[in-house]
Amino acid sequence: MGTTQQTDQHRSAHQRRRQLLEAADRVVLRDGPKASMNAIAAEAGITKPILYRHFGDKGGLYRALAKRHTDALLSALKAALDAPADRRARVEATLDTYLAAIEARPQVYRFLMHPADNTATADAQLPEQGFDVGRHSAPLLRRLGEELAVVIEERVDLGPDSAQLARVWGHGIVGMMHAAGDWWLGERPCSRAQLVSSLADLLWGRLALVDDRAGSPGL
Amino acid sequence: MGTTQQTDQHRSAHQRRRQLLEAADRVVLRDGPKASMNAIAAEAGITKPILYRHFGDKGGLYRALAKRHTDALLSALKAALDAPADRRARVEATLDTYLAAIEARPQVYRFLMHPADNTATADAQLPEQGFDVGRHSAPLLRRLGEELAVVIEERVDLGPDSAQLARVWGHGIVGMMHAAGDWWLGERPCSRAQLVSSLADLLWGRLALVDDRAGSPGL
DNA sequence: GACTGTTGTTACCGTAAGTAACAGCAGTGC
DNA sequence: GCACTGCTGTTACTTACGGTAACAACAGTC
């Protein structure tokens, strides 16, 4: 075997890589986070060592896959964030874009969000490794948080310490979106629009404004 | 071997279980998320099958361990949430309590937060299992989110749909805290107090209040 | 026609989860 | 005393998966 789909065999390694990633995508879409290298290789019509030649290890494949999806998601989010509307509408559009994405492909979402582990032999105190890839965990949320921080800092005037505040907010907002989305995806307690509105209310400081409950200790 | 620490051998199975969990705790504290069942058994002075008799599978041990830590963390958070101070101070105290906890024991934190996987063979559509433990993913963040939702709904008057809004906010706030904490723990870009203050500002709606940056498109 | 590089294979290793199957020993009823 | 039950513990195994070595086939090139 191996001579079946070899009709056009001299496409570039880059094309081959994309093809493998698409197969991996399909398997992940079907099997969720349990997708094994064997299963992915089988889906691509090849065997494991080829995957390893292309991606080094499972983390490499994971990162390549994550980059694809993160790039796609991120450009969608940026578009929502840059839409011609006021800030509240933009925030809601961004939240909705994210939630629509995870709703559309929950399996991919779960695979990307729960990487299981990566390089971390023991000490956890090694200063740097030289590579930027595979450094620490940082699979998708980290990147989203950083990118959102950039957008926030570009667009909003946060005064002194703006860079740092923007990063905290970026990661915090992404985490809020993620956790609420993860819960919502599992339980579906309300419509997407309601969730978006509730989260935007939270970001708009409604927690600080509402009254204490009648019977609660008067603080 | 095996006759060494058998001085008082007829303590209840519950005591034994606690002892095993403490050993597991120690290993997790040392090895992080890579802690193997063999290593845990060795730390407890026994071998694997005993762990499996007590906890069923690795997921069972994980859940038991998670419950311990979640209970402890949750009671600390509830205490902070119930302190005699205004809402902002209480929120800051709660954030700080959480961050101090993950700062104090990052290995345990990482083990609990990155469960890698659990029961999820394929369909993801099985109705119920009979047990309440091991249902779906919901390791720690879910529970924190639900508990925070309860506290929010008890203490704050959110009007109609208050139950649902409280749950969204509970999960959202926990997610914000988690993501920001995870990032902060990895990079340590600022002091804990600064992080707490920035997150509280975010929850207080400062995002809605600040001005657009000078050069940005006028929306 | 030999040389090299790519694509593919089979067959293997190491590790870790999970599982028999068996051994020792406490208590209980006869 | 003696079988029976039940708990704690063991060794040794199976299975599955990540990762690797060694080899086979073939395209293009000098």
Image (spheres, coloured by chain):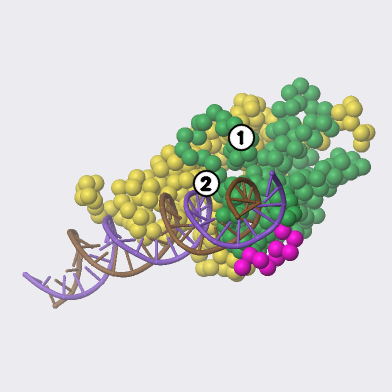
Chain colours: A green, B yellow, C brown, D purple
Q: Residue A167's quadrant in the figure?
A: top right
The secondary structure that dominates the magenta segment is: loop
Q: Residue A84's quadrant in the figure?
A: top right
Q: Are marks 1 and 2 on the same chain?
A: no
Indicate left or right for A187 with B208 as reference. Answer: left
* Residue that numbered label 2 is attached to: B112
Q: Amino acid at mark 2?
A: Leu
* Residue that numbered label 1 is attached to: A131
**Residue B69 painted magenta:** no
The subunit carrying tag 1 is A
Quadrant holding the N terminus of chain A = bottom right
Residue A6 spot, x, y in % from top left: 70, 63
The CA distance from mark 1 to mark 2 is 27 Å
Residue A143 spot, x, y in % from top left: 70, 40
Residue at image position (75%, 38%) is: A147
- Extent of the magenta region: A1-9
